[in-house]
Amino acid sequence: MAAYEKMLRTFSITLATLIGVAMLVIIARLLVKHRRIMVKEEDVEMQSFDESSTRSKRDTDG
């Protein structure tokens, strides 16, 4: 195997590893962002549910 073939093989392995790690980081960040959005939506739903339940209690009490 010629020297340039070894160098090319090492370069391709290194490049593939870097691309793989970058893809994993991107996927992890997207999952974290998605989870934050879902938690925020659940908080908003629970908040509106709590407000509506307190309003109905006030309406029936008054």
Image (spheres, rainbow, N blue to C red):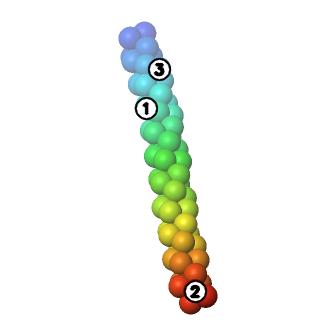
The percent position of residue 30, horizontal first and vertical second, equals 46, 46
Disc 1: which residue: 19
Mark 2 vs 1: CB contact within 8 A: no
The percent position of residue 14, horizontal first and vertical second, equals 48, 24
Q: Nearer the viewer, residue 57 or 53?
A: 57
Residue at the extreme top: 3
Q: Quadrant of the C terminus?
A: bottom right
Q: Is residue 22 visible?
A: yes
The percent position of residue 47, horizontal first and vertical second, equals 55, 66
Could you give the CA–CA distance between mark 3 and mark 1, rounded to whole angstroms? 14 Å
Q: Which residue type carries mark 1?
A: Ile
Residue, x 43% and y 32% (percent of image)? Answer: 19
Could you give the CA–CA distance between mark 2 and mark 1, rounded to whole angstroms? 64 Å
Could you give the CA–CA distance between mark 2 and mark 3, rounded to whole angstroms? 78 Å
Horizontal relation, residue 47 to residue 1: left or right: right
Q: Which residue type carries mark 2?
A: Gly
Dot 3 or dot 1, earlier in sequence: 3
Q: Nearer the viewer, residue 12 or 30?
A: 30
Callout 3: few (<14), some (14-19), or many (20+) C-alpha neighbours within 10 Å?
Answer: few
Question: In terms of secondary structure, where does tag 2 sit?
Answer: loop
Q: Which residue type carries mark 3?
A: Thr
Disc 3: which residue: 10
Residue, x 51% and y 34% (percent of image)? Answer: 21
Q: Nearer the viewer, residue 62 or 51?
A: 62
Q: Is residue 20 visible?
A: no
Q: How many marks?
A: 3
Mark 3 vs 1: CB contact within 8 A: no
Disc 2: which residue: 62
Q: Compared with residue 51, is residue 11 higher up or lower down, i.e. above or below? A: above
Q: Compared with residue 23, is residue 51 higher up or lower down, i.e. above or below? A: below
Residue, x 50% and y 70% (percent of image)? Answer: 48
Dot 2 or dot 1, earlier in sequence: 1
